[in-house]
Amino acid sequence: MLGVLGVVLAGCSSGNNAVDEGPNKKELVAAVGENEKQEGENTEEMAGKTAAQYYYTANEGGSISKIDAATNTIINTIELEGSVHNVQVSPDGKIIGATLVPETGGHDEEDESHEEEGGHGEGNSGKALFFDVESDELIKEVEVGNHPAHIVFTENGNFAVVTNNEDNNISVIDMASYEVVNTVETGIGPHGFRISADSQKAYIANMGEDTVSVVNLETMKEEKRIKVGAVPVTAGVTSDGKTLVATLNAENALAVVDLETEKVEKIEVGVGPAQVYVDVNDEFAYVANQGTKDAPSNSVTVIELALRKATAEIITGKGAHGVVTSPDNKKVYVTNMFEDTVSIIDKGQNKVIETIEVKGVPNGISITE
């Protein structure tokens, strides 16, 4: 979204003014040339900011894969003791956060179906881990609740929020001290979620019931629960804060909610939808259809939000689960849990242009800006 500055130069001359036209014209040309040079530098600088460096996958087998976005090659694997369910890059692009469940109670790699109430095993206290993006070094390990699912940073960088699936609450971590400063109750089985662009509210899909919890991150209280449909796995929200989306795993649908009226519309997607991601322009929502281990789905449904309509179905790999769009809005990245791959989709073509192997059951995915 670039503004274009148009400069119109007009002149009229006669008599003595014509004598000065030569040097004045040279100065104007020089000035325009300098402006064009500066404009080019600004464009390059902006392009540098929007081009992703890395993307990360959370691997249930016990690792985080760091992948070069330019070459789609794995440049590092961070090995961990336990099951890594979700990863998230901080808004400033400097920190990668991850949720870790101990080895004694990781996800069942044979069937990450999200069909059971809550969707996870019981009694698995976990951790939020924070790594430096450039060095990959561990910055801090923070104890959270039982079976942490997703982690999301507030846009202002003040907090990281973790859903504790078996405790029916969230842990709010202060990013200045890396300490849990609040624990907020939610619905049953909180799982995937997003935080509003103004950093004020978290919209949390409660897998054990048919609701999305709206948590006020200023008062640190649950404001209300919005009924959306059966087994919501992950929620998302548009940047203007007006529209909520949630995948309904048991209904093979995406719930689209007007947050002013709380009116819910349901759009049919593929079988067993897992994650959903709203692109940077709030134009499309991308739904990863996972299915089950025994009967895997292998597609992403593209929803045009203005039309409230599915406009494309993109074939990916088996068990499409995590999904994210690139900062420049040109690509979509999807983890395929049941074949250990990541699909890279060209948004313009709605087509997979490359598939790479990522071992260890890739689940959540996040990308740097």
Image: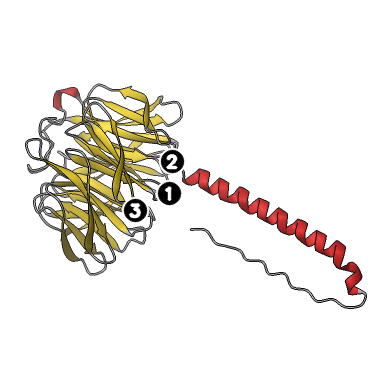
Q: Position of residue 60 (x, y in %)?
A: 21, 29
Question: Count the marks: how many?
Answer: 3
Quick check: 205 left or right of 306?
left
Residue type at mark 3 is: Asp
Q: Which mark is residue 328?
A: 1
* Circles 3 and 2: CB atoms closer than 8 Å: no
Q: Is residue 91 above or below residue 248?
A: above
> Residue at 21% across / 41% down in the picture?
321
Q: Looking at the picture, how far across and down is residue 243, in whole percent?
A: 28, 62
The secondary structure type at the circle numbered 1 is loop
Q: CA distance from mark 3 to mark 2?
A: 15 Å
Of the residues under marks 2 and 1, which one precedes in the sequence? 2
* Secondary-structure class at tag 3: loop
Residue nearer the viewer, 11 or 42: 11
Relative to 262, does residue 108 appear above or below in the rendering? above
Crowd band around label 2 with a 10 angstrom C-alpha radius: few (<14), some (14–19), many (20+)? some
Q: Nearer the viewer, residue 294 or 198?
A: 294
Residue plotted at (20% across, 54% down): 246
Q: Residues within 10 Å of mark 1 (few under 14, many from 20)?
A: some
Q: Nearer the viewer, residue 317 or 335?
A: 317
Q: Are marks 2 and 1 in contact (CB under 8 Å)?
A: yes
| Residue denoted by label 2 | 52
First-in-chain label (3 vs 1):
3
Comes first in the chain, label 3 or label 2: 2
Percent from the top left, x then y, of residue 229? 12, 57
The image quarter containing residue 179 is top left
